């Protein structure tokens, strides 16, 4: 009977509206612009070496093996976070979780699309903005385009991806996004110095 | 703030990304339930706390998230080397380089 | 018009007096580029402060960061007050308002100056020897007086409206100090193309070139060359040049902290500008070019306003165009003071006499002084200075005694020689060595990848300095990875150099005098104080320093340390190195708290974590509580309700119909892999292998020592996939704990952990009507008790979005926890709320949640347990897998005292008077009549008014508690003892029928 | 020992303070002593003092590798309180507090014990539960500790920010009025002077390099940089270096040594009347008689004997200070330094006999040792003199880690020492 109820309701219920954190927030300062990025599909992928080939094939992007690197193809980016860990971000609405589901090789794929918020930091002062709270060396020779790393911004953990010589993608957990955006906003005021 | 070479990330990273995890090479007995009170005390509480060379564990908490081992001089805080978890305790140490 | 002591044409500043400022309420004019000190001197003002202990009148000793005397308060507005600002480094700006400190009622007449008369009583460490009777008088009488007299400026009393910026930076070569040496090193390094940062504390680069009129480099005046060279460096994109930037701390592995003063020198700073900017620089190589600091002569009353370092007087003249007097005397043991006398004489200032302690020095400067007609006396000492608010004379005597002669002067220029600034080198943990010939400590053994050049390395003369620095800069670049070395070394055409000088007290302050010959000006430490300390058995310089406070003032002994050390050594009859040098500690000069805090203020002090449902709760007027970094809805008061009324209503409503609760903050970890169950077996006390997919179990996690670490409901989604929940506060440490064991102890297991705390918003729907509320929104999940019994989990859809639906209860009622992707959380909550409204359900907060679980005797880890509680103590033995041979904590919990009788056990408590609610944390005793100290047998861990039970309820840890059922115990409170009865932990629906009710 | 008094000062003033005698003598080490104390910090010197004054044992040497009082004694933030939770801790810290009151007179040396009150802040419901548990336990143990509303807390400490919008608003506080501060150097020097006057040898610049034991295992003396010195009993009071010394005797300890940093501001006129501690935001602050704000920072995370720490540790502390006292951002840090604190697994000290006959150890005070100085020395002297612990320190054994009878204030209360 409850089953019946459930079936009936399926028609009636309007799908829930998605309300991303900080949706659409932006900020511009001398030399740098911040923008909260639209929702994306994300998985945390864990796997031993032996499974990397199969997973790369399924995902359509070659999982990088080199520390602090990333690989991107067709709107899908795989970031090396650890020796057996990748963050896969899909910005064109395809579901990497479903792709991995096909793979029989040993791995763990967990959906985290809603766990993270992406913020873009762009402009000549982008690196300086991030360096106001991030202790890594962000010069182009040490942190080149495509470099990706989990690290620290102020008092929280972020994942940092350099998308161009003057552009970064900052990923953080949902409940830290307000802190991160506020921190970057304050830093941006001073970044041109 | 120390600068620590992560053996997995293969580069030096700022201490802020790391968390110290105490003395290294203190193995948990596979038959821990059968250990004597003395053995358990040694395993869980007694530490060498050396003034000089220490073998210690770190986690690259906010980096690759791996635990690894380091050899450090507790007087100068200088790292002699770092190596991956599970690798044997090094018998030869690199000369106390700057 | 031009200020009285500004010499037309002298110095480098445009002498148009465009800048107005005020000091102690009087307004003056200065010129652009002045410091507050140079501007006051230009106006003939020498008296600017009072000393710490004796409140003696004080003027300017120096023209730089080493200044011990001229500390003032700078006030932009009520909230922008800064105490203890060195007038010698504060740049003048139009409208600057400064005030003297540590005087009352006025600078010229300071009542506390009686301390000066009473000074024989206020000898070194006198306070250790008195103020002891009667006992209470120290706190109530003496200490308040001492405190009121001590202290310099006044702390700000309003929140600071300015903001502070911060930056991490990396470079190949960091050059600290922008004098000739630093500039040369930076040029050499920069030309190779490596990343260079050059920093100097002053507004203009050049260091001693500010006053060395004799220096010529590449054909130009030394200072002009410096400006040109720095301009060249600024133009290179591999170089960052930081002026007004002080390197204050040298930390491990070439990590250097610097503070840049961004806007304190501006008349009306743009409020977007930070006040200061902290630079944390990691450098491959560091070049220390921190120069040297001139020492004063130690003689009687050497602290009178108008008595200053020779190099300071020279700086005021050659850079600022200011004469420090009209008729100056010179007292020196060193050539450099001659250069000052010569410059002043040439500028038309009267030089009464040069008194040189040395017997027969020779050299060009001496000949030149004579040639200019300056009276030069050798082998003589200034044994006394006359005057009070301003020096009026110097009394001269042959250094081995003989006739005195008093010479009227309005300023005395002193030089006892130069002390290399080894502060940063010493902070880098390098070891200094004492050069007996030159009587100075210089860098010896290096501990880090750095090198000292120029005066701070004991290198004398501009040519030698630039040779050394340029080579060092090039080498540093090479060591840091540079290959191309090009560029040309600056050529020194003319240079100044001078010989040694002396350490310690001059004859005028010789061993047997009782005069005040100051070593440390600000702390009023005299030569005799240091001798007294030694006489009292202080043999190490650390003891002498602490006993006399020599070198512990805001200047940190920049001018006093070496003199103090020499006097101590002389008194001990030991060579200086054996007495030792005090260690230099960060910061080099004081740095504001603000600059160190940087952005971490207000909202950025610590992240505030909010759930997806937070906005809804806020709109409903919920009151929030802090749990770790999270804000959690505490209760939802309706108009007119206080906390108790709201909580009572929420508790009753949940049990009558249903309630919605935001459980999103609970930690969640997805454990995935073929060995997932094996891993769970090892990390939790419970058995997991046999748990069916689709079912849940309450799990307990221990530390290896056997005490409860965390708990939570775990659902098995699939044979190789668990959905683990943790406490809100425990989430991060549980994840780290699991990873630690997985990576270190059980690396053979094929399993991975992913934090999904923030992937899922969690809505608990609890109460008899919970199923009716959820069912209409659910797709693809059979919610019947048969298909979805208590403690089970299903994946499906709710409101058209993916969901993990748990059938579980933390209230004892039929209950569910709806997990949906976080971005959908609020909308799904609203849909459930709409359904709930139809049944009269409420939203409830953490307080009601606590009461409801307590009514059922469910524990809260961290409240009912505290890190010293075993599963047995908590009555959770049933959750420990009896057949298991290993899990974290299995051995620890078997230690003798953890299985001993009489341990504190969790029990229920009922007050004899049902209306009385115990206080959490209240202590429990068996015999209320015993005297203090009482034997406490336990304490109340949780206590609430339970509207559902119609009485108060409580949980408590009580020694041997489970053997005391029905026993009467006592809770002594300040206002009377409360009788309680020991009971079971379940206060409501003991049979647990409502789980399916 | 010439008595100190205002009259003595006046007398000396007449003759230019040349008549003061040495506060302690610096003798050459003898071949043998009845008791050797390793470490001339406050605890070690107090132990020697009470051995002499209470137990009449004066053939005692205190060996110090550096300068007396130059270790943690001279590097700590001098907070004194006794409002601990457990009977064992409350027992020893209140024993100390009772001795602090009157110590200046006892030693004829003004140690400037100033009971200006120690306030501990509650920032959330959990803090309130924990701190109230302390208040109740303290009351039944006869230890003063009262609960204050935020308003009352602000009245007692005007600079305190009790705004509801603070990131972690102050929801209340405990106050121990007998708590306060003392002058750290004076404590070491006062005990040194008192011990020296009674014949105790304080031997500085004398580093212990080995502990000698007889075939039967008993202690016979110590090797030092100034030669072998014999003794029937050796008390190790070496703070951060305890593991090092105990290892020489073949005893491995449940200890780890961490850098602990502190800092002072420039001196300002009186602005801060008491001691304030917040364990939730990690801040400890008071104002010295000289006018400096004295601020305790946290420990670094790794074992170290370097006596230096990271800048980020100071940052973390000053963040909290400026959050609670927003007017202080314009104040300036004058001096910062590091000490080495030895920490046990339950953060409580070890004050006990050891498996080695004639060897005694007093260590593991972590960040909280200064406040215990008089009590610790008093009961440790008893333990050495009688070869049997005083009832007050009887629970602080080495064995408790094996049996599990811990005294875990931190776990029980999340309260830093």
Image (spheres, helix red, strand yellow):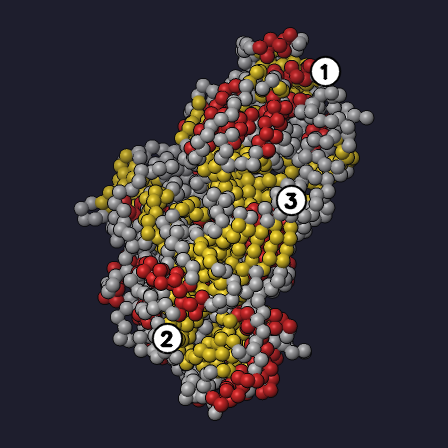
Q: Are marks 3 and 1 on the same chain?
A: yes
Report the residue at 74% width, 30% height from top. Answer: C31
| Residue designated by label 1 | C348
Q: Do labels 1 and 2 share a chain?
A: yes
Of callouts 3 and 2, which one flags the residue occurring earlier in the amino acid sequence?
Answer: 3
**For residue D322, above or below residue C584:** below
Residue C575 is labelled as: none
Secondary structure at badge 1 equals loop
Secondary structure at badge 3 equals loop
Q: Nearer the observer, disc 3 or disc 1?
A: 3
The foreground one among A84 and D314 is A84
| Residue designated by label 3 | C275
Subunit under mark 1: C
Report the residue at 47% width, 28% height from top. Answer: C485
**For residue C777, above or below residue D26:** below
Secondary structure at badge 2 equals strand
Asked which quadrant contains residue A110, the reply is bottom left
Residue A39 in the image, given as x and y percentages of width and height: 54, 65
Task: Please rate how many residues cluster around mark 3, counting C-alpha atoms within 10 Å: few if below 14, some from 14 to 19, many from 20.
Answer: many
Subunit under mark 3: C
Q: Which residue lies furthest to the left in this view?
A: D215
Of callouts 1 and 2, which one flags the residue occurring earlier in the amino acid sequence?
Answer: 1
Q: Which residue lies furthest to the bottom in this view?
A: A1
Q: Residue furthest right?
A: C1
Task: Please rate how many residues cluster around mark 2, counting C-alpha atoms within 10 Å: few if below 14, some from 14 to 19, many from 20.
Answer: some
The foreground one among C796 and B82 is C796
Q: How far apart are marks 3 and 2 (CA)?
A: 57 Å
| Residue designated by label 2 | C718
């Amino acid at each position: 009977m409850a089953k019946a109820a459930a079936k009936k309701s399926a028609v009636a219920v309007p799908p829930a509206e998605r309300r991303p954190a900080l949706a659409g927030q932006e900020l511009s300062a001398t030399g740098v612009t911040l923008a909260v990025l639209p929702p994306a599909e994300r998985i945390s992928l864990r796997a031993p070496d032996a499974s990397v080939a199969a997973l790369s094939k399924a995902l359509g992007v070659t999982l990088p093996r080199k520390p602090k690197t990333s690989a991107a193809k067709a709107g899908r980016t795989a970031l090396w976070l650890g020796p057996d860990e990748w963050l896969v971000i899909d910005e064109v609405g395809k579901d990497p979780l479903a792709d991995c589901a096909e793979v029989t090789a040993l791995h763990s794929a967990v959906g985290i699309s809603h766990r993270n918020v992406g913020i873009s930091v762009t402009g000549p002062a982008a690196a300086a903005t991030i360096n106001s709270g991030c202790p890594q060396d962000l010069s182009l020779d040490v942190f080149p385009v495509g470099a990706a790393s989990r690290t620290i911004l102020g008092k929280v953990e972020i994942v940092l991806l350099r998308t161009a010589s003057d552009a970064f993608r900052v990923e953080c957990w949902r409940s830290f996004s307000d802190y991160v955006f506020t921190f970057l906003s304050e830093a941006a005021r001073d970044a041109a110095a | 703030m120390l600068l620590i070479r992560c053996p997995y990330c293969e580069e030096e990273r700022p201490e802020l990304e790391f968390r110290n995890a105490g003395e290294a090479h203190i193995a948990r007995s596979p038959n821990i339930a059968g250990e004597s009170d003395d053995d358990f005390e040694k395993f869980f509480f007694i530490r060498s706390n050396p003034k000089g060379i220490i073998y210690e564990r770190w986690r690259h908490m906010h980096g690759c998230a791996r635990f690894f081992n380091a050899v450090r001089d507790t007087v100068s805080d200088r790292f002699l080397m770092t190596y991956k978890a599970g690798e044997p305790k090094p018998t030869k140490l690199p000369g106390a380089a700057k | 018009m031009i200020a009285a002591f500004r010499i037309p044409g002298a110095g480098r500043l445009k002498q148009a007096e465009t800048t107005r400022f005020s000091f102690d309420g009087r307004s003056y004019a200065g010129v652009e580029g002045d410091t507050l000190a140079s501007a006051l001197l230009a106006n003939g003002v020498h008296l600017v402060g009072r000393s710490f202990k004796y409140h003696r009148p004080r003027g300017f000793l120096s023209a730089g960061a080493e200044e011990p005397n001229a500390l003032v308060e700078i006030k932009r507005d009520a909230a922008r007050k800064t105490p203890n600002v060195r007038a010698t480094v504060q740049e003048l700006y139009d409208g600057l308002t400064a005030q003297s400190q540590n005087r009352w009622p006025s600078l010229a007449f300071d009542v506390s100056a009686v301390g000066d008369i009473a000074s024989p009583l206020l000898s070194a460490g006198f306070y250790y020897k008195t103020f002891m009777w009667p006992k209470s008088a120290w706190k109530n009488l003496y200490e308040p007086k001492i405190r009121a007299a001590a202290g310099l400026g006044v702390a700000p009393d309003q929140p600071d409206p300015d903001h502070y910026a911060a930056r991490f930076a990396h470079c190949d070569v960091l050059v600290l100090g922008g004098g000739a040496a630093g500039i040369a090193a930076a040029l050499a390094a920069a030309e190779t193309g490596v990343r260079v940062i050059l920093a100097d504390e002053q507004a203009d680069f050049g260091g001693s070139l500010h006053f060395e009129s004799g220096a010529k480099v590449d054909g130009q005046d030394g200072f002009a060359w410096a400006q040109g060279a720095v301009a060249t460096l600024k133009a290179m994109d591999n170089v960052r040049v930081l002026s007004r930037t002080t390197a204050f701390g040298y930390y491990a592995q070439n990590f250097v902290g610097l503070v840049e003063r961004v806007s304190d020198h501006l008349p009306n700073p743009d409020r977007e500008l930070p006040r200061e900017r902290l630079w944390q620089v990691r450098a491959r190589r560091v070049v220390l070019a921190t120069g040297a600091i001139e020492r004063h002569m130690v003689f009687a009353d050497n602290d009178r306003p108008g008595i200053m370092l020779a190099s300071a007087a020279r700086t005021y003249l050659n850079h600022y165009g200011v004469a420090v007097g009209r008729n100056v005397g010179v007292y020196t043991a060193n050539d450099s003071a001659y250069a000052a006398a010569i410059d002043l004489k040439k500028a038309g200032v009267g030089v009464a006499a040069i008194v040189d302690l040395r017997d027969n020095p020779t050299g060009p400067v001496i000949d030149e002084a004579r040639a200019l007609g300056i009276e030069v006396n050798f082998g003589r000492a200034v044994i006394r200075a006359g005057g009070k608010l301003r020096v009026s004379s110097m009394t001269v005597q042959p250094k081995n005694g003989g006739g005195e002669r008093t010479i009227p002067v309005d300023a005395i220029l002193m030089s006892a020689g130069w002390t290399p600034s080894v502060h940063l080198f010493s902070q880098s943990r390098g070891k200094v060595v004492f050069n007996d010939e030159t009587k100075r400590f210089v860098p010896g053994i290096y501990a880090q990848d750095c090198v000292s050049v120029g005066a701070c390395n004991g290198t004398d003369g501009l040519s030698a300095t630039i040779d050394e620095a340029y080579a060092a800069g090039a080498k540093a670049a090479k060591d840091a990875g540079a290959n191309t070395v090009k560029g040309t070394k600056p050529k020194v055409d003319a240079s100044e150099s001078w010989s040694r000088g002396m350490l310690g007290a001059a004859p005028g302050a010789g061993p047997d005098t009782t005069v005040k010959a100051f070593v440390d000006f600000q702390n009023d430490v005299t030569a005799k104080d240091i001798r007294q300390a030694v006489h009292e058995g202080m043999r190490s310089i650390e003891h002498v320093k602490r006993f006399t406070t020599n070198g512990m003032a805001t200047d940190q002994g920049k001018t006093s340390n070496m003199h103090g050390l020499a006097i101590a050594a002389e008194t001990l009859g030991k060579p200086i190195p054996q007495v030792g040098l005090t260690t230099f500690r960060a910061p080099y000069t004081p740095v504001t708290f603000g600059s160190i805090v940087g952005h971490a203020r207000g909202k950025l002090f610590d992240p505030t974590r909010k759930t997806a449902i937070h906005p809804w709760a806020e709109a409903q007027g919920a009151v929030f509580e802090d749990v770790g970094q999270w804000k959690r809805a505490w209760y939802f008061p309706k108009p007119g309700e206080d906390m108790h009324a709201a909580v009572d209503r929420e508790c009753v409503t949940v049990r009558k119909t249903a309630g919605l609760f935001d459980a999103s903050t609970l930690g969640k970890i997805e454990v995935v892999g073929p060995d997932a169950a094996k891993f769970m077996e090892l990390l939790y006390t419970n058995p997991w292998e046999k748990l069916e997919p689709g079912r849940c179990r309450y799990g307990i996690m221990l530390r290896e020592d056997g005490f409860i670490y965390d708990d939570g409901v775990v659902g098995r989604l699939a044979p190789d996939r668990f959905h683990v929940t943790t406490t809100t506060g425990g989430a991060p440490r549980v994840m780290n704990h699991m990873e630690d064991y997985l990576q270190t102890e059980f690396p053979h297991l094929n399993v991975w952990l992913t934090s999904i705390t923030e992937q899922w918003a969690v809505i608990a729907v609890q109460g008899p009507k919970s199923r009716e509320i959820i069912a209409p929104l659910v797709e693809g999940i059979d919610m019947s008790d048969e298909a979805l019994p208590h403690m089970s989990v299903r994946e499906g859809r709710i409101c058209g979005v993916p969901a993990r639906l748990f059938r579980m209860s933390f209230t004892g009622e039929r209950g569910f926890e709806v997990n949906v992707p976080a971005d959908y959380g609020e909308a799904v909550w609203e849909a459930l709320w709409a359904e709930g409204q139809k049944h009269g359900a409420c939203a409830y907060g953490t307080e009601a949640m606590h009461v409801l679980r307590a009514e059922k005797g469910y524990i809260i880890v961290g409240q009912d347990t505290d890190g010293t509680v075993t599963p047995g103590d908590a009555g959770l033995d049933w959750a420990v897998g009896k057949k298991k041979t290993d899990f974290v904590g299995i051995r620890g919990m078997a230690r003798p005292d953890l299985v001993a009788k009489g341990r504190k056990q969790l029990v229920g408590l009922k007050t004899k008077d049902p209306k009385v609610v115990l206080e959490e944390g209240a202590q429990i005793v068996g015999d209320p009549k015993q005297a203090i100290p009482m034997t406490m047998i336990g304490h109340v861990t949780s206590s609430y008014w339970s509207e559902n039970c119609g009485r108060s309820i409580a949980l408590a840890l009580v020694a041997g508690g489970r053997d005391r059922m029905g026993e009467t115990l006592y809770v002594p409170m300040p206002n009377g003892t409360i009788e309680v009865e020991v009971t079971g932990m379940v206060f409501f629906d003991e049979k647990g029928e409502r789980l399916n009710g | 020992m010439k008595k100190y008094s205002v009259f003595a000062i006046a007398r000396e003033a007449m003759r230019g303070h040349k008549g003061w005698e040495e506060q302690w003598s610096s003798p050459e080490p003898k071949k043998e002593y009845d008791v050797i104390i390793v470490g001339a910090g406050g605890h070690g010197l107090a132990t020697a003092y009470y051995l002499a004054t209470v137990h009449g044992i004066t053939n005692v040497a205190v060996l110090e590798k550096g300068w007396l009082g130059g270790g943690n004694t001279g590097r700590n933030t001098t907070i004194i309180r006794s409002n601990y939770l457990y009977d064992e801790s409350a027992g020893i810290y209140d024993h100390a507090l009772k001795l602090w009151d009157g110590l200046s007179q006892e030693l004829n040396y003004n140690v400037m014990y100033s009971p200006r009150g120690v306030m501990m802040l509650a920032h959330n419901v959990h803090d309130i539960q924990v701190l109230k548990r302390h208040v109740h336990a303290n009351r039944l143990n006869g230890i003063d500790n009262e609960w204050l509303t935020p308003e009352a807390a602000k009245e007692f400490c005007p600079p305190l920010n009790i705004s509801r919008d603070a990131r972690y608003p102050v929801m209340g506080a405990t106050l121990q009025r007998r708590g306060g501060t003392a002058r750290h150097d004076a404590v070491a020097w006062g005990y040194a002077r008192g011990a020296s006057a009674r014949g105790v040898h304080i031997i500085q610049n004398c580093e212990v390099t080995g502990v000698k034991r007889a075939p039967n295992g008993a202690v016979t003396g110590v090797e030092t940089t100034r030669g072998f010195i014999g003794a029937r009993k050796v008390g190790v009071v070496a703070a951060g270096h305890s593991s090092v010394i105990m290892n020489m005797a073949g005893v491995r300890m449940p200890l780890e040594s961490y850098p602990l940093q502190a800092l002072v501001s420039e001196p300002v006129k009186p602005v801060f009347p008491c001691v304030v501690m917040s364990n939730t935001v990690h801040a400890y602050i008071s104002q010295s008689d000289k006018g400096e704000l004295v601020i305790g920072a946290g420990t670094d995370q790794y074992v170290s004997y370097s006596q230096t720490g990271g800048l980020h540790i100071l940052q973390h502390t000053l963040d909290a200070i400026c959050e609670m006292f927003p007017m202080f951002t314009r104040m300036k840090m004058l001096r910062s330094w590091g000490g080495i604190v030895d920490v046990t697994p339950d953060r409580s000290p070890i004050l006990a006999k050891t498996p080695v006959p004639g060897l005694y150890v007093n260590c593991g005070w972590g960040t909280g040792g200064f406040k215990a100085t008089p009590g610790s020395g008093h009961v440790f002297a008893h333990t050495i003199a009688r070869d049997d612990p005083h009832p007050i320190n009887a629970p602080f054994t080495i064995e408790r880690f094996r049996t599990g009878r811990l005294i875990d204030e931190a776990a029980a209360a999340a309260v830093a020492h």
